[in-house]
Amino acid sequence: MWPFSHKEPAEDTAPNTPTPRLLSYQAANLQGIGARARQEDSFLIVNALDVTEMKNKGLFAVVADGMGGMKDGKIASETAISCLRGEFAEFDRDGDIAEQLRRAVVKASAQVLSRLGGDGGSTVVACIIFRERLYFASVGDSFILLKREGHLYRLNREHTYRNQLYLEAIRDGSMDPEPAESNPEKAALTQFLGMDGMNEVDYLRSPFPLRENDALLICSDGVGGVLTDGQMLDYLGRATPTEACAAIDEEIRRQGRKHQDNYTALCIYCGY
Amino acid sequence: MALTKCANDHLYDSDLYPSCPYCNGGGNAISFDGPGKTTPLGNMGGGSPDPIGQPAPDAFASVEPGATVAPAGYRKRQDDDNKTVSVSRKKTNLEPVTGWLVCIDGPDKGRDYHLYDKQNTVGRGEGMDIRIEGDKTISRDRHARIAYDSRHNNFTLIPADSTNNIYVNDEPVYIPRKLDAYDCVEFGESKFVFVPLCCPRFTWADGLVPAPKEE
């Protein structure tokens, strides 16, 4: 039984019963162009600064990494973001949020496909925090990471050829990671928004309860593929999400990789 | 520090920036209407969300004439610049199709599934070569396999880890069984017609063989 019921009369409440508290969230974002000529990542954070809307409609955070190997990455990632923003606004908050989010991602893919005819695409990680629970849906190789009690957890699975080869090695019993590691196309995506025949969305069917001091990092591979797990864990431990973003930016600039990809990071801290 | 939200839902410090530094960066970004307004892009139709794996029926119809449409076997390599690129394995390696299963009854009625050389796994889960998503009575992994043997140019159905019976032409199948053209294969609650491409009339090695003359 839920111990903090609002319906109980005040006089029945024991004096030391804690009052119900709801998690609140702080968010910050970061984006850099890296060593690229163009910025093809897109992102949004909806309701981050509006406490009432955050409570009633949820916090919505999305990162989309347009595929620079293809026709126009920015059009793909912006199309996806724009579609998801519209879909999120129309969600039935009393309905199945996880399923609505999955459908929104499928719809976003259809829109990117319609616009670019299959010759352009984008990854996406879309996450909703609503009623203290996390929902997400992901396609491609962007990241959603959770810091909890001093550990870093990656919550989504990459749709890369490497992962597909790993699975095949497990299925055929060879258990040999070498073919995947040595394949020159191991980093290529097997699923992305705008792909003709996209048929896998990695998403949470039932939401994940968040706790005080949890921190989320949603980022493109320009961040997740450049920083070590230890660094990300360290930066998510900074006092505020803005400071975490600043630390990420500083480290990426310090490394100054010759082929640094576009990088985008959203940090969300949970607390009271 | 004054955290501010721009019309495109980016956060920025308005003490540092007069306007959102993430919008229209580099002059290459496209601007969209602000939040809360669902704007159709281009000449795209609205419509309800589509089930996974089935692009909107109008998705291609709405591509402008003359627009670049990717060929069926498009392939994008990872360039040395580590850009995000794509590959779709079966299509892209142009692995030749050897035959098809066509769903004629069940949740996926009307869909076809490609068969390739050697072993084709059948199941509902990710990673299956023949992924039948709609029928929950089909096992996730390895409901069955369908093997094409190029040496003898024939197809064999091999029951695998399914707990439900598999039927071919209404007869239960417990051991590997050769498939003939237009055999009716039942997995779970779905029925499929097996249509071979590779047959006495055609193989990828020898190509098309002229039809035998009728006496």
Image (tube, coloured by chain):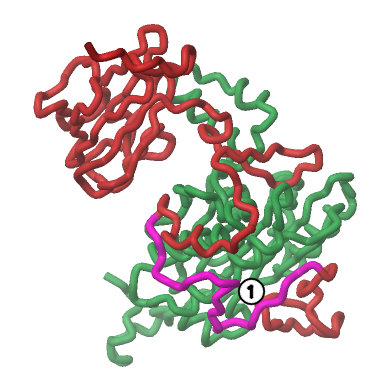
Residue A208 belongs to the span the image colors magenta: no
Residue A136 in sight in this render: no
Tell me, by letter, which chain the rendering colours red. B
Depth check: B201 or A90 in front?
B201
| Apparent side of residue A107 relative to residue B43 in the rendered image (left or right) | left
**Is A104 drawn above or below residue A46 in the view shown?**
above
Where residue A156 appears, x then y in whole percent? 53, 49
Secondary structure, magenta segment, majority class: loop
- For the residue marked with disc 1, what is the amino acid? Gln
Residue B31 belongs to the span the image colors magenta: yes
Q: Chain of mark 1?
A: A
Q: Which residues are magenta?
A: B28-51
| Apparent side of residue A171 relative to residue A49 in the rendered image (left or right) | left
| Apparent side of residue A103 relative to residue B182 in the rendered image (left or right) | right
Q: At numbered mark 1, what does the secondary structure look like: helix, strand or loop? A: strand
**Is B152 drawn above or below residue A149 in the view shown?**
above
Report how many numbered discs are placed on residues in the image: 1
* Residue located 60% across and 51% down the image: B69
Depth check: B118 or B61 in front?
B61
* Residue located 33% across and 85% down the image: A6
Of the chain colours in the picture, the one used for chain A is green
Where does the N terminus of chain B fall, quadrant-wise? bottom right
Residue under label 1: A26
How crowded pointer 1 is (Cα within 10 Å; few <14, some 14-19, many 20+) is rated as some
Depth check: B114 or A141 in front?
B114
Where residue A179 appears, x then y in whole percent? 61, 21
Where does the C terminus of chain B fall, quadrant-wise? top left
**Is A262 drawn above or below residue B210 in the view shown?**
below
Where residue A1 appears, x then y in whole percent? 26, 70
* Residue located 62% across and 54% down the image: A121
